[in-house]
Image (spheres, rainbow, N blue to C red):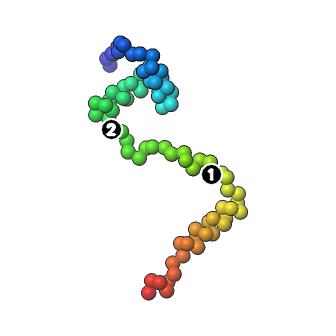
Amino acid sequence: MGSLSIRGIDNNLSEQLKKNASAEQKSVNQLVIDILKQHLGIIKHKKFTRSYSDLDQLFGSWDNESFDAIKEKIDSERNIDDELWK
């Protein structure tokens, strides 16, 4: 496997690479390799891999009584009125 040295990286770019690598739990080296491969079309960005956390504050916040009430409402909406389908 080959090596490549890149000269002329300014402090801003260096810090941004370190920050992004840390956020993705990668080494700076692996991050740069992944960026190069993606830019050159060697690997494609995976679809549907984005992670969302906009509803995290709701996780575990319902008590059993609230859960039962919500489940009852959902179940009642799922009932099919046979008279409407004749």
The residue labelled by disc 1 is 58
Residue drawn at point x = 36 percent, y = 25 percent: 33
Q: Look at the picture and state if 51 lies above or below 71.
A: above
Q: In which quarter of the image is the C terminus?
A: bottom left
Q: What element carries label 1?
A: helix
* Label at residue 44: 2
| Left-right relation of 79 to 14 | right
Q: What residue type is labelled 1?
A: Leu
Q: Nearer the viewer, residue 4 or 58?
A: 58
The reply to whether discs 2 and 1 touch (Cβ–Cβ < 8 Å) is: no
Q: Look at the picture and state if 53 lies above or below 11.
A: below
Q: Nearer the viewer, residue 61 or 82?
A: 61
Q: Is mark 2 on a helix, strand or loop?
A: loop
Is residue 27 at least partly visible in the picture?
Answer: no
Around disc 1, counting alpha carbons within 10 Å, would you say few (fewer than 14), some (14 to 19), or many (20 or more)? few
Residue drawn at point x = 32 percent, y = 19 percent: 1
Q: Position of residue 58 (x, y in %)?
A: 62, 51
Q: Where is residue 51 in the image (x, y as percent from the top left)?
A: 49, 43
Q: Where is residue 63 in the image (x, y as percent from the top left)?
A: 70, 57
| Left-right relation of 51 to 60 | left
| Left-right relation of 72 to 10 | right
When asked about the image quadrant of residue 74, the answer is bottom right
Q: Look at the picture and state if 52 lies above or below 84.
A: above
Residue drawn at point x = 32 percent, y = 35 percent: 43
Residue drawn at point x = 45 percent, y = 83 percent: 85
Alpha-carbon span between mark 2 and mark 1: 34 Å
Is residue 20 at least partly visible in the picture?
Answer: yes
Q: What residue type is labelled 2?
A: Lys
Around disc 2, counting alpha carbons within 10 Å, would you say few (fewer than 14), some (14 to 19), or many (20 or more)? few
Q: Position of residue 60 (x, y in %)?
A: 66, 51
When asked about the image quadrant of residue 67, the answer is bottom right
